[in-house]
Amino acid sequence: MRKFWVIALDVYRKNVKSISFLIMILIPFIMLGIVYLAGFFASQANDINKIGIYSQNAEVAKTLAASKDKEYDFVALSSEKEGEKQLKNEKIDALLSVTISGDQISGELLSTSSLGQSTDLQIQQLLSGLQSSARAQQFGLTAEQVAALSQPAKFEKKKVSFDEGKMKVGDDHGAIQFMISFAATIVLFVFIITYAQIIAQEIASEKGTRIMEIILSSTKARTHFYGKLVGVLLVAVTQLLLYGLIFGVSWSKIKEMDFAKSFLEGFSLKGISGSFIVFTILFVILGILLYAILAALCGSLVNKAEDTAKAILPVTYLSLGGYMLGITLGTNDPNNIVVKVTSYIPFLSSYLMPTRLANETVNTAGALMSVAILVVFTLLLMMISARMYKSNVLIYNANGVFASLKQSLALMRTEKEK
């Protein structure tokens, strides 16, 4: 046991003290800072688009010119030729030509460069509003009647449960649960891709320097395998705890920011309490563990540390498949039969079951069954990988991973027969 902790702590200290670990910790905050600063300076230095407008109907041109927005400013023009001249001389950024045919209003926007999708959408909405007003006048409707017609219908979502045949209405926390499951999917993918490379590199580097024979002469192969695995997982846990600590310390400042206030409106701790958050954490931890074991197995099959990127391709593709299923099909159609089936399949369930729990398309019994399958499969893969580890790290085959795996299995059979 002492040798196990010596190996695990050595791996842990080496990675935690490295520059790459510090960069991993700082990158999310650096990216958030860059995005925040870019948005801040863009809003401060954002030039208002000056759009010239011409229409044969002077009233329509005046009505549009009176509308103001932070992204554009309309200028009524006396003729289309004048507008083309100002556009050529860069006195205006675009020219909007409005044509009226009966109750149909058409607009044509001429510009040397794009004004952005939001500006295009707002101009289209303005023209649609004018067209609706023109048709309302044709039908003899008042402004109040037009406003009443355009008023959206009320929609409210409630969560219900049944107790002894009686329906009870409760709070719906689907939105906050969905956001947490979405974030968990992204965190899981990033951690798997990051730490799969680290653990494979740890094993392959020792094998490549031929120091593995010396190490295995003083300790068991399984002890070395488990030590490496636990050491890297401790690094991942440290990173998660540091993120939690930083977030907890800065929470008082974050909740006072403008962008956070709108996001946290209606936020309730009840939405993230109970079985949902427990299962989500379980699936994330078990997912990282399962992929780490597979990455360690793949890393033990290569001859040099430089080949680890190729060796962990199965980890990358499996993780990418689960991520894409969870982020697209899982969020858009949680009742899909593909989502239901794959939420019980190891390597994929860690991505899909939290999404199903957030959308409440699975009960606690289903989640427990998925956890049980994942735990059993993870333990089986761990024992198989540990058993294969000794033969894997002592084989040097230049014909690739599959050739190494085949040779390793043959060596295991030979040793078993002895």
Image (cartoon, rainbow, N blue to C red):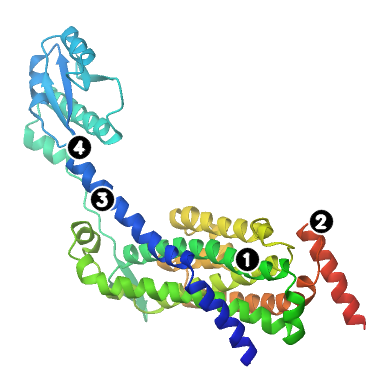
Q: Which residue is mark 2?
A: 399
Quadrant containing the C terminus is bottom right
Which is nearer the eye, 106 or 328? 328
Which-is-in-front pick, marks 4 and 1? 1
What is the C-alpha distance between the residues marked 1 and 2?
19 Å
The residue under label 3 is 37
Say above or below: 391 vs 53.
below
Screen quadrant of the N terminus: bottom right
Tell me the amino acid under the disc marked 3. Answer: Leu
| Residues under numbered marks 3 and 1 in contact, where contact means CB atoms less than 8 Å apart | no
Circle 4 sits in a helix, a strand or a loop, which is it? Answer: loop
Rounded to the nearest angstrom, the CA distance separating label 4 from label 1 is 46 Å
Q: Give the residue at mark 1.
A: 201
Residue 137 x %, y %: 11, 24
Q: Determine the image quadrant of residue 243.
A: bottom left
Marks 4/3 in contact by CB < 8 Å: the verdict is no
Question: Is label 3 in a helix, a strand or a loop?
Answer: helix
CA gap between label 4 and label 3 equals 13 Å
Disc 3 or 1, which lies upstream in sequence? 3
Q: Which residue is mark 4?
A: 46
Residue 29's spot in the image, x, y percent?
34, 61
Mark 1 lies on a secondary structure that is helix
Picture quadrant of residue 411: bottom right
Query: What residue occupies the far right of the structure in this picture?
Result: 418
Q: Is residue 33 above or below residue 84?
A: below
The answer to the question of whether label 3 and label 2 lie on touching residues, with beta carbons closer than 8 A, is no
| Spatial separation of the CA atoms under disc 4 and disc 2 | 58 Å
| Residue 64 place in picture, x, y as percent | 12, 25
Q: How many marks?
A: 4
Of mark 4 and mark 3, the one earlier in the sequence is 3
**Which amino acid lies under the numbered mark 1 shown in the image of this protein?**
Gln
* Residue type indicated by callout 2: Asn
